[in-house]
Amino acid sequence: MNESELARSLDELTLDEDERGVVMPALAALAAWTVEPTSKDTQALIHHLSSLLPANAPAPTNLRARSGVHDELEYLISVAVSQMTVLHAGFWVGSLVVMAIGGLLAASQQDGTRNVVLYLAGPLLAYIGTAVGFRAESIGVLEFEFACPITPRQLTVARLLVIVGYQTVAGLVMTVAFSAVIGSTVQQVVAMWLAPLLFGTGVTLLCSLRFRIAWAGAAVYAGWVGLVVLAWRFGSMALAASVPIEVAIAGIGLASIGVAVWWLPAAMPSILNRRRWSIS
Amino acid sequence: MGAVGQGDRASLEVLVSRYHSQLLGFFFRMLAGDRATAEDLTQETFVRLLRQTTYSPGRPFRPWLFAVAANLARDHLRQASRRPAPDDPALAALEDPGPGPEARAVTGAVIDDVARAVAGMPEEYRVTLILRYGNDLSLEEVAAALEIPLGTVKSRLSVGLRRLRDALPAERLGR
């Protein structure tokens, strides 16, 4: 700061002329009171800092650039929107068809059989959603996850939003459409398919950390069908469809989703190894 | 800054070359001429830049850089003030808040007096004066760096200048 700049800077403050005359030389001295690094110092500092540079990290930079819940939410939504393009039309149509058929069947059945139909529809949706949307080999989802700068955990959460969100909205529409025919309240019908949907999705995702997603989904769905058939045969469907059981089923599903999302980064190397093994 | 975050060494060189001198000067003044600690804190500031999580593109860089530096200087001064006073006279001499030997050797008597006066000021006035008149940040940049209102910056500067004037020997100021 030269003398004229210093004088101008003092105009910002309410100093009288005497005060200005007194502090001007002091401020000039303050500006002059410094040390300069040598070029060797600067090069040594650059050398030290270079060793701390991220190797090649565009993604972390992007992630660091966001701060706050609002930014994170906005980012998650933008990732979720981008994930919609990854999914085949078969998923969108298939989910809708399952819900429509489920609705039609439920509307045409008596109470006991209706519960069975709804209990089977939810996990079937979960099977379709997880098999197509999470590490589906046919569309190279796993390769996409590894090539993508977004973390697998973020991708999974975004994809859950898209898949479960879409299936839930589609299910709600169908439920409202058929509720008059079915006779039960909308809440009762929603609980009948939503709880198993969450259960199927969560347990399948959890099992997929250890087994291939298609096998995990098929095993979970087969196990679920077996349980429902047993409950039906032994006349326990009313108990199985009671509110506490539905809440427990949904709770297990949500907890499984949470655990699967949490453990996903640690499980990625073994998932990749399984994929390599299946390719070879 | 974005390129540095992506691991671009050339951008790092530009960043360090541009701000090394400014940061070293800032810490040197804040720490009353302790060059060795000023160099350590300058390096620590750059390390924090590389590991930072709070900078977003579009945010003015210099106030943010000096916000990091000011926080480091503040932390260091607080830690230093909590240390017990040394009994050894030689150690006590090292803790002298006046300008260091290097500053004394290379600067004139006025600078020496100004350095002592600034070193004796409360930290909030010292950092405001140094950022504005030592590092040539605008009032708005100082406000952003210290995260205080513009009016507070002006008031600190006014009070700081009066304290500076009062702390200097009369003969230095032609009084």
Image (cartoon, coloured by chain):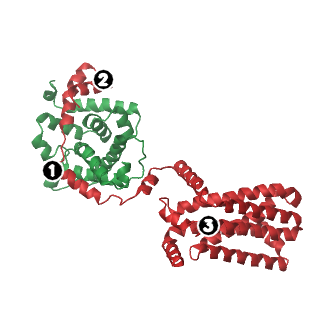
Chain colours: A red, B green
Circle 1 packing at 10 Å, graded few (<14), some (14-19), many (20+), is few
Q: Reply above or below: B136 against A266.
A: above
**Separation of residues labelled 1 and 3 (CA atoms):** 63 Å
Mark number, residue B93: 1
Q: Reply above or below: B10 against A135.
A: above
Tag 2 residue: A11
Tag 3 residue: A257
Q: In the rendered structure, which amino acid carries the disc numbered 2?
A: Asp
Q: Are marks 2 and 3 in contact (CB under 8 Å)?
A: no
Q: Secondary structure at mark 3?
A: helix
**Depth check: B96 or B74 in front?**
B74
Mark number, residue B110: none
Would residue A115 appear left or right of B26 to someone viewing this image? right
Q: Which chain contains the residue that carries disc 2?
A: A
Q: Is residue B118 visible?
A: yes
Q: Which chain contains the residue that carries disc 3?
A: A
